[in-house]
Image (cartoon, rainbow, N blue to C red):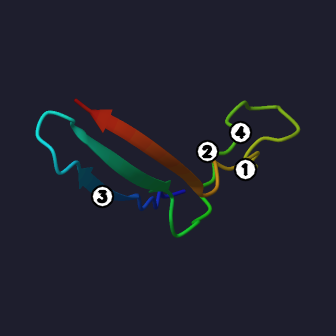
Amino acid sequence: PGLVDTDLSLLKRFQFPEPGLGAFQFRLETFNILNNVNFWGPDNTFGSPTFGRLQGAQDARVIQLGLRYDF
């Protein structure tokens, strides 16, 4: 089976008005944003009862938030 995976990151930087205080960065990251089903390869052990069958799929959509301080 083929692999279809679309990732997206959005970043916003907030700078303090006074010099020397640094900045914050807010991050939103999404993996497999379109939530496509990506199956693992089929079982290739000859003689196995599950030979040739798809046994699972990769992770669904994952979303994570982050906050970073630069000084």
Q: Secondary structure at mark 4?
A: loop
Label whose residue precedes the other's in the sequence (1 or 4):
4
Disc count in the image?
4
Q: Secondary structure at mark 3?
A: strand
Residue 57 position, x and y percent, is: 68, 50
- Residue, disc 1: 54
Specify few, some or many for label 2: CA neighbours under 10 Å numbering under 14, 14-19, or 20 or more: some
Of tags 2 and 3, the one toward the viewer is: 3
Specify few, some or many for label 3: CA neighbours under 10 Å numbering under 14, 14-19, or 20 or more: few
12 vs 47: above or below: below
Please give the label number shown on residue 12: 3
Callout 1 touching callout 2 (CB < 8 Å): yes
What amino acid is labelled 4 in the image?
A: Asp
Q: Report how far apart the C-alphas of labels 1 and 2 lie in the structure.
A: 6 Å
What residue is shown at x 61% (from left), y 45% (from top)?
41
Label whose residue precedes the other's in the sequence (4 or 3):
3
Please indicate whether residue 37 sits to the left or right of residue 50 in the image.
left
Between 61 and 71, the one nearer to me in the picture: 71
Q: Report how far apart the C-alphas of labels 1 and 4 lie in the structure.
A: 7 Å
Between 53 and 31, the one nearer to me in the picture: 31
- Residue, disc 4: 43
Residue 8 position, x and y percent, is: 38, 60
What residue is shown at x 63% (from left), y 45% (from top)?
40
Q: Report how far apart the C-alphas of labels 2 and 4 lie in the structure.
A: 7 Å
Q: Report how far apart the C-alphas of labels 4 and 3 lie in the structure.
A: 44 Å
- Residue, disc 2: 41
Between 8 and 70, the one nearer to me in the picture: 70
Between 55 and 30, the one nearer to me in the picture: 30
Q: Report how far apart the C-alphas of labels 1 and 3 lie in the structure.
A: 41 Å
Residue 62 position, x and y percent, is: 58, 52
What amino acid is labelled 1 in the image?
A: Leu
